[in-house]
Amino acid sequence: EEAGIKPGEHLPQEVLDRVATMGKAFVMSPDDIAQAVLFAVTMPESAHVNEIMMRPSQPLQMPGMNLPA
């Protein structure tokens, strides 16, 4: 049991709303992704973009959760 939640119980809507609000500050926008794609497809033919890796500049950190950076 962590934070008053027992295994198998659902989180209260208030908690889900707080997490969703916090998460939005750390999620890239569709425009961020679109700009990267536009960059890749407008490169000259002599340039080959093999991979694009994007991560939020501020990794999400929540107490009790280990998320990859």
Image (spheres, rainbow, N blue to C red):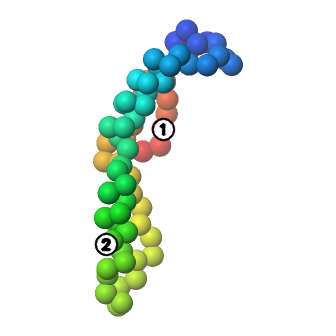
Residue 21 position, x and y percent, is: 37, 30
Residue at image x 52%, y 12%? 3
The quadrant of the picture occupied by the N terminus is top right
Residue 62 lies in quadrant:
top left
Answer yes or no: is residue 61 visible.
no
Label 2 belongs to which residue?
A: 39
The circle on residue 50 is none
Residue at image x 34%, y 50%? 29
Figure check: 56 above or below 11: below
Figure check: 52 above or below 55: below
- Distance from the alpha carbon under mark 1 to that under mark 2: 28 Å
Figure check: 58 above or below 17: below
Residue 59 position, x and y percent, is: 37, 41
Circle 2 SS class = helix
Q: How many marks?
A: 2
Contact (CB < 8 A) between labels 1 and 2? no
Amino acid at circle 1: Leu
Task: Tell which circle, 1 or 2, labels the residue nearer the N-terminal end.
Answer: 2
Amino acid at circle 2: Phe
Front disc: 1 or 2: 2
Residue 15 or residue 62, whichever sits in front: 15
The quadrant of the picture occupied by the C terminus is top left
Residue 47 or residue 69, whichever sits in front: 47
Answer yes or no: is residue 55 visible.
yes
Label 1 belongs to which residue?
A: 67
Sort mark 2 into few (<14), some (14-19) or many (20+) by Cα contacts within 10 Å.
few
